[in-house]
Amino acid sequence: MEKGSPPPAEVPMHEQEKQGGKCCGGCCDYRRAVIVLCIISLVFSVIGIINPSLNQAYQDQEYPELEQIVKDHSTNLLIMGIVHIIMTVIALVGAVIFNFFMVAIYVFWSILNLIISIVLQQQMVGELLDWVEKQTDDASWSASNQDELESSFNTYMIMNYVITAILTLLWVYPSVFLSVEIKKGIMTKETYPREEMSCCCVSKRG
């Protein structure tokens, strides 16, 4: 630069090259992805809690033990649902205000929620199988029938756990990357004009 020439003008933040990642290979930035996913999660979680058909306990007085098993499981689901809503709201607010801890705690909760859900489901399956065994004391129901039923249940539940785990990881991965970007200072209130990105809602950068 020649002596006496004016210093180079600082490049506006929105014109600078994006430093953070892109969710799903270019769909949007991680902050936008977390906000959208949190809103979707809240909608379905609230519907699941307020919809009576999803929470109605088994009402057959002929099988009081079965009714109690289903009631206990429904109570556990309700508690988990309420906690999930609280954690999702925390993550949503954290994404909006660029708070690392509020987003990171949602990541931790998602993993914990997966583990607790698997434990509770396995417990319910065990109780249901025990109940079936008590009810089938006739000669036509042998031990091999019970073993076959348990094997079928376990196979189905293992497949269900694997699919649930994969979906949970896919659902939470934007929160992981957002928390990392916030922690590194890549994604902040000041830098968001540079990091903002969407395939449909934000004009493409040159």
Image: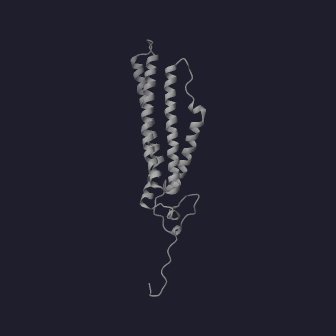
Q: In this view, does 71 lie to the left or right of 111?
A: right
Image location (x, y in percent) of residue 109: 45, 44
Nearer-the-camera pick, 73 or 23: 73
Image coords of residue 116 (percent x, y): 43, 37
Extreme residue in the top direction: 139
- Specify the farthest residue to the bottom: 3
Residue 77 locus on image (x, y percent)? 50, 34
Q: Which of 111 and 75 is in front in this view?
A: 75
Residue 159 in the image: above or below residue 64:
below
Camera-side residue: 32 or 84? Answer: 84
On screen, 121 above or below 187? above
Could you tell me if residue 97 is visible in this image? Answer: yes
Q: How is the image coloured?
A: one colour
Number of marks drawn: 0
User: Residue 188's spot in the image, x, y percent?
Assistant: 48, 61
Q: Residue at x 56, y 32 (%)?
A: 55
Visible residue check, residue 27: no
- Residue at image location 50% in from the left, 50% down from the top: 91
Q: Dividing the image into 4 quarters, which one contains the N terminus? A: bottom left
